[in-house]
Image (cartoon, helix red, strand yellow):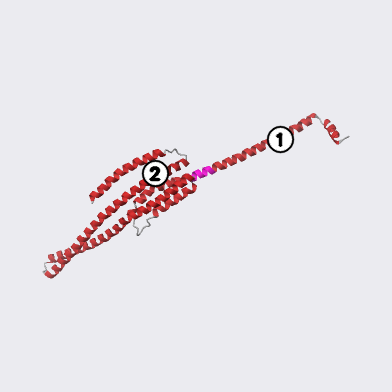
Amino acid sequence: MQPIEFFLELAKQIPSTIWAAAVASVLTLTGVALSNRSNTKRLLHQLSHDSQEKHKERNATMRRDVYLRAAEEMAGIGHYLGGLPLMDPIRENLSKGLVEPLRVFAKVQLVSEPGTTELVGELTTRYSEIFLTLLGQAQPVHDLKIEIDIANDSYLKSQAEVDRTLAEMRQLNESGESDPSRYEALRLSFEHVQSLAIEFAQERQALYEQHGAALKAFTTQLMQEMRSIGPLQVRVISSIRRELRLETDISEYESRLQQNWERLDEKLAKLLDQMGHDR
């Protein structure tokens, strides 16, 4: 008998219940294998999805923190630039107010989308240009402040001499002693130091007027520069809001910005006019 015929004959002798159990076992194992394969595939897909979502969430959190910090620095730069004339160039680093904003803007460029990166890069360049322009405009204010301090110091010293001489003349008169030569010397000294005090006072007043004019010129330049950068700031803010998935209407922002500048222009014109009358 051939081996195949022998095997078939042997299989016929196995009870059908055993065959049914064997077939059921095979089907069960196949089902389990397919289920495990499907579950594994679904688990891998879920893990990949979760990883992507966590990555997006980390990026969103990082961007939100950096963007909020950038918004704060943008709001503060105008205040810093406006205070340049009041700073002491001898004792202070006039560029210190730009260090932190530029550092934050560099972080924005690192984590932002290409469009925002380009806008922030342009904004950084414009702030640097404005700083250099206003630094030159503030220089006359600083120079005049130094001259005012010198003139004021000379005036105070002369005035102290005037007071001292008058006190000595009063003391001589009240003593009842007759000393014409000393009194004449004190009188001549009084007239000399008084003339110096008047001269220094007039010089100081003239310097104050020049200082006011220089400060007025700086303020005008500051407003022009800040107004010129306004549309770019709006574009940067709008781009950042879009990345944060916040509702953004750039035309509304631009309209509001224009209205604010018109109000500021009106107030500034009145202030500058008042400064002119005060001189």
| For residue 23, side relative to residue 87 (left or right) | right
| For residue 47, side relative to residue 266 (left or right) | right
Residue displayed at 60% across by 39% down: 45
**Residue 148 position within the rendered picture, expressed as x and y whole percent measured from the top left:** 27, 58
Q: Quadrant of the N terminus?
A: top right
**Residue 177 position within the rendered picture, expressed as x and y whole percent measured from the top left:** 11, 68
Q: Main secondary structure of the magenta part?
A: helix
Extreme residue in the top direction: 16
Q: Nearer the viewer, residue 235 or 151?
A: 235
Label 1 belongs to which residue?
Answer: 30
| Amino acid found under the numbered disc labelled 2 | Pro
Q: Nearer the viewer, residue 70 or 61?
A: 70
The magenta span reads 55-63
Q: Residues within 10 Å of mark 1 (few under 14, many from 20)?
A: few
| Residue 207 colored in magenta in the image | no
Label 2 belongs to which residue?
Answer: 231
The answer to whether residue 163 shows anywhere in this view is no
| Amino acid found under the numbered disc labelled 1 | Thr
Gap between marks 1 and 2 measured at Cα: 67 Å
**Residue 118 position within the rendered picture, expressed as x and y whole percent measured from the top left:** 46, 47
* Chain-order first, disc 1 or disc 2: 1
**Residue 101 position within the rendered picture, expressed as x and y whole percent measured from the top left:** 42, 50
Extreme residue in the right direction: 1
> Dot 1 lies on which element?
helix
| Residue 62 colored in magenta in the image | yes
Give the numbered dot on residue 46.
none
> Dot 2 lies on which element?
helix
